[in-house]
Amino acid sequence: MNSNHHRHLGRRPVLLPFAVLWASEAGAAGLSSAQAGTAMALVVAVVVVLVAGLALHREQRRREVAEEALAASTTQQQALIDTMVDAVITLSDSGTVQSFNPAAETMFGYTAGEVIGHNIRMLMPEPYHSEHDGYLARHLLTGECHVLGHRRELEAQHRDGSTFSIELAVTDMHIHGQRLFSGIVRDITERKKMDKLKEEFVSTVSHELRTPLTAIRGSLGLLTGGAAGDLPQQASALLKLAHNNSERLLLLINDLLDMDKIASGKLDFRFGILAVSPFIEEALTANAVYAEQYGVHYAITHQLETAHVRGDGDRLMQVMANLLSNASKFSPQGGTVEIGVTRHDNQIRISISDHGPGIPEEFHPKLFEKFTQADASDTRQVGGTG
């Protein structure tokens, strides 16, 4: 019987060698069936414990690998932040600085240890210094947002008390149930200086050019108007060409001046009630000579005789001059520029259409940027500042 029992157990690979030996000896000693059952249960328990231990070891190793990967990723991210040229500052939801990268140390003149744990107000001049806590509290309470998710130009304060211009972008994040704010700060002092120098240059040159050009334009206008008597046909044609080009140059200079005023917020408007039909007729008359240079004529396709709008007549005339001149420049020889006036609810639409090549679709996003042209090459067929 023992021999058969041994052969039977030898065919069960799930039992461990020591368990087989123990069971064999127990059978030889003539253990009761209850004792044999207990022995087998003990063997099964040992196997279960070993399997569970192996699974636990594998899980532990998986966690270790994940933690190693996370640590490597965190180290890489921190290295990236530490080498950024822009300052990166993280704050708690109470405005306390949590981190301060090396670029921030260079920009503000503080070490990270001098800033971390303190309120971000220490980096702000007035009125931002006094207003910051109230703004943050309102944002947390109501969601009101002036900076979050936007880029804003502000003033910051250096450790020595001096102020400088910055561009600030703030985002919020939630880490382990805690709400944090991350700010990327860029020093734009040099950019602001360059912008100011450019604006001053454009303004100065424009004013200096406009004074003599106005005199030249006036003199040419008198000559072409017959103030000096009848002129030979060839001389009259040359004077007319010179007068037209002086008009065009004056328009370009006025465009430069207006751009300068818009950028500085000093553009003035004089609003009043404007009759649309006479306004359209005046615009076409003023630009007819320009259209003749390109062999183009104007045609009114729709008109509202009784329409009135509230606006600045001079500024609207500038808009009309720009649109009409562009339409003339890009129309084919002998083409027609069509002007239509229609009503849309309580608004008046003035449309100017030409039959030229049109504006390339890829240029549409830049359409309202200053001094931009779809063809800005030196070989373009038409001029203008864009």
Image (tube, rainbow, N blue to C red):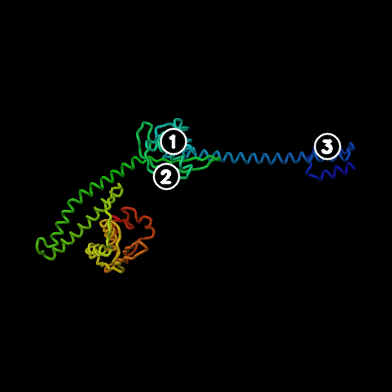
Q: Quadrant of the N terminus?
A: top right
Q: Could you tell me which secondary element the residue under label 2 belongs to?
A: loop
Mark 2, residues whose alpha carbon is within 10 Å: few (<14), some, or many (≥20)? few
Give the alpha-carbon distance from disc 3 to disc 1, as whole Å.
73 Å
**Residue 127, horizontal then vertical, whole percent:** 37, 37
Up the image or down, 151 lies above or below 319; here it is above
Between 120 and 277, the one nearer to me in the picture? 277
Mark 3, residues whose alpha carbon is within 10 Å: few (<14), some, or many (≥20)? few
Instruction: Say whether disc 2 or disc 1 marks the residue closer to the N-terminus.
Output: 1
Circles 2 and 1, Cβ within 8 Å, touching? The answer is no
| Residue sitting at x 23%, y 65% | 292
Mark 1, residues whose alpha carbon is within 10 Å: few (<14), some, or many (≥20)? many
Q: Is residue 205 left or right of residue 364?
A: left
Residue position for label 3:
22
**Residue 124, horizontal then vertical, whole percent:** 39, 36
Q: Can you see residue 293?
A: no
| Residue sitting at x 81%, y 40% | 41
Between 240 and 318, the one nearer to me in the picture? 318
Q: Is residue 227 left or right of residue 78?
A: left
Residue position for label 1:
120
Residue position for label 2:
146
Instruction: Say whether disc 3 or disc 2 marks the residue closer to the N-terminus.
Output: 3
Q: Amino acid at mark 2?
A: His
Nearer the observer: mark 3 or 2; the answer is: 2
Q: Could you tell me which secondary element the residue under label 3 belongs to?
A: helix
Q: Amino acid at mark 1?
A: Ile
Residue 315 image-quadrant placement: bottom left
Q: Amino acid at mark 3?
A: Trp
